[in-house]
């Protein structure tokens, strides 16, 4: 637009100021004044002795003025021709926009058809209300290589509570199991089983097999995964009231930045699973019915772990039982899971496997100590060994963390039977 002589744009005034500043003499005179006095100075030079060169301070002022001019011009150009990624003009131009305003984030990734199907299923299953039957039950699922050496303790735990629990046993050495049961409580409760290798996907397959069998009973509302070395540290009534009716699953799950956490994530898990979604934890979960349904129905994310996880592999060192359920439920329903397992394990020895309790280790003090723990602790696997402590709280109410414990050797059975009545009074 053409402007009159009385109407000069801000841009033009700025350029004039800059030009005046650039041609200003060291003494503060403008360029015009310097030219006017030029002739007089020439005459004086012939009459006066030679003066020393300009001081360094004067030169420094010239360079500072030039630098300020360049900065001003850069900001002015940013206001007139804003960059595409960052707006700095509001900082100086007073447009009312917040400073350093970033453009909107890129649109979310387009899910594949299998992923979308899984998300739709998850949405509907998770939103299902807790539909308790007339007599809701807890499914106790034992993942064991063979017979249960502590079966006598479990008989004591279950006694008098028939109709409130179901038992399922997955034994990889099935041929020795058929004739091994001495307890009528466990007879004919073993399911069709297959070989299980430590740390491999067959461990997850066994978990899913147990869940599938337990889900066939509609009265089963909560599903507890246990090993042959697990023991109860609470009474059945305490466990039942703790689990039944609570719309939460207890899954040990945390973000470990170290080599045993994010260090086991590899690029082939992308795009379905991003590294920031990767989680680690103990495999001994306790899940509500909705989450049990999701685990057995999932094949999208399960397939990633089945095809990629290889314990000890040079490129894909991954233990599916420590990552699959933890990562999957964290991605699908993070608010529906706790961050701790209700099964106590002692990793204080810093070995690949947790501490084993022998007869001389077991005492009422030990079991009472486990009962009193009401704070979950996670330790990163990097050199920092950073601890994360969180209260064990359900629905805003602080609770004791543990209902069960492992690993207890067969020789502890008799002393545990003697102590069990004393530790389960409350």
Image (tube, rainbow, N blue to C red):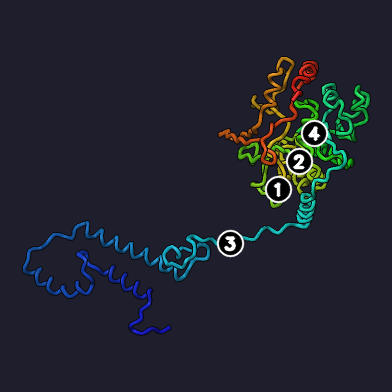
Q: Which mark is residue 331?
A: 1
Quote the CA–CA distance across marks 1 and 4.
28 Å
Image coords of residue 396 (percent x, y) = 66, 40
Image coords of residue 8 (percent x, y) = 35, 79
Q: Given the current orientation, which residue lies at the most extreme top position?
A: 360
Circles 2 and 3 in contact, beta carbons < 8 Å: no
Question: Tag 3's secondary structure?
Answer: loop
Front-lying residue, 47 or 14: 14
* Residue that label 4 marks: 240
Quote the CA–CA distance across marks 2 and 3.
39 Å
Lower sequence index among marks 1 and 2: 2
* Residue that label 2 marks: 246
* Residue that label 3 marks: 104
Lower sequence index among marks 3 and 1: 3
Lower sequence index among marks 1 and 4: 4
Lower sequence index among marks 4 and 3: 3
Q: Give the position of the C terminus as an image quadrant.
A: top right
Image coords of residue 94 (percent x, y) = 43, 67
Q: Label 4: few (<14), some or many (≥20) within 10 Å? A: some
Front-lying residue, 156 or 414: 156
Quote the CA–CA distance across marks 4 and 3.
49 Å
Q: Give the position of the N terminus as an image quadrant.
A: bottom left
Give the foreground label among 4 and 3: 4
209 relative to 84, above or below: above
Quote the CA–CA distance across marks 1 and 2.
20 Å
Front-lying residue, 129 or 77: 129
Question: Tag 4's secondary structure?
Answer: helix
381 with respect to 8 (left or right):
right
User: Which residue is rendered at x = 65% and y = 36% of the image?
Assistant: 260
Question: Tag 2's secondary structure?
Answer: loop
Lower sequence index among marks 2 and 3: 3
User: Which residue is rendered at x = 36% and y = 81% of the image?
Assistant: 7
């Amino acid at each position: 637009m053409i402007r009159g002589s009385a109407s000069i744009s801000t841009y033009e005034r700025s350029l004039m100021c800059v030009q005046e500043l650039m041609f200003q003499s060291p003494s503060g005179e403008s360029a015009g004044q310097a030219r006017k006095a030029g002739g007089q100075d020439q005459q004086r030079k012939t009459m006066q002795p030679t003066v020393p060169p300009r001081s360094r301070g004067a030169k420094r002022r010239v360079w500072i003025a030039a630098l300020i001019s360049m900065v001003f011009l850069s900001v002015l150009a940013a206001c007139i021709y804003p960059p595409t990624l960052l707006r700095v003009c509001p900082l100086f131009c007073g447009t009312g926009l917040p400073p350093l305003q970033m453009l909107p984030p890129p649109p979310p990734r387009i899910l594949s058809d299998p992923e979308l199907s899984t998300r739709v299923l998850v949405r509907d299953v998770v939103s299902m209300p807790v539909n308790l039957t007339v007599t809701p039950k807890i499914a106790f699922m034992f993942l064991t290589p063979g017979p249960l050496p502590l079966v006598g303790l479990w008989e004591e735990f279950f006694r008098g509570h028939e109709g409130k629990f179901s038992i399922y046993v997955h034994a990889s050495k099935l041929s020795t199991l058929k004739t091994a049961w001495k307890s009528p409580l466990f007879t004919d409760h073993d399911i069709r089983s297959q070989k299980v290798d430590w740390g491999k996907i067959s461990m997850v397959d066994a978990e899913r097999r147990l869940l599938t069998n337990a889900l066939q009973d509609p009265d089963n509302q909560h599903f507890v995964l246990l090993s042959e070395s697990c023991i109860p540290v609470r009474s059945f009534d305490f466990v039942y009231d703790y689990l039944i009716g609570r719309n939460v699953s207890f899954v040990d799950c945390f973000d470990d930045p170290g080599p045993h956490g994010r260090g086991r994530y590899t690029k082939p898990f992308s795009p379905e699973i991003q590294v920031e979604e990767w989680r680690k934890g103990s495999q001994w979960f306790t899940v509500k019915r909705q989450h049990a349904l999701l685990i057995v129905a999932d094949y999208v994310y399960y397939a990633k772990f089945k095809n990629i996880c290889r314990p000890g592999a040079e490129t894909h060192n991954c233990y599916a039982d420590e990552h699959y359920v933890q990562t999957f439920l964290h991605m699908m329903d993070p608010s529906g899971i706790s961050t701790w397992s209700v099964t106590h394990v002692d990793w204080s020895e810093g070995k690949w496997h947790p501490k084993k309790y022998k007869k001389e280790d077991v005492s009422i003090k030990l079991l009472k100590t486990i009962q009193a723990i009401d704070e979950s602790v996670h330790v990163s696997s990097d050199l920092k060994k950073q601890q994360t402590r969180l209260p064990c709280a359900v629905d805003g109410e602080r609770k004791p963390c543990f209902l069960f414990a492992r690993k207890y050797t067969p020789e502890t059975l008799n002393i545990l039977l003697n102590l069990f009545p004393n530790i389960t009074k409350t």
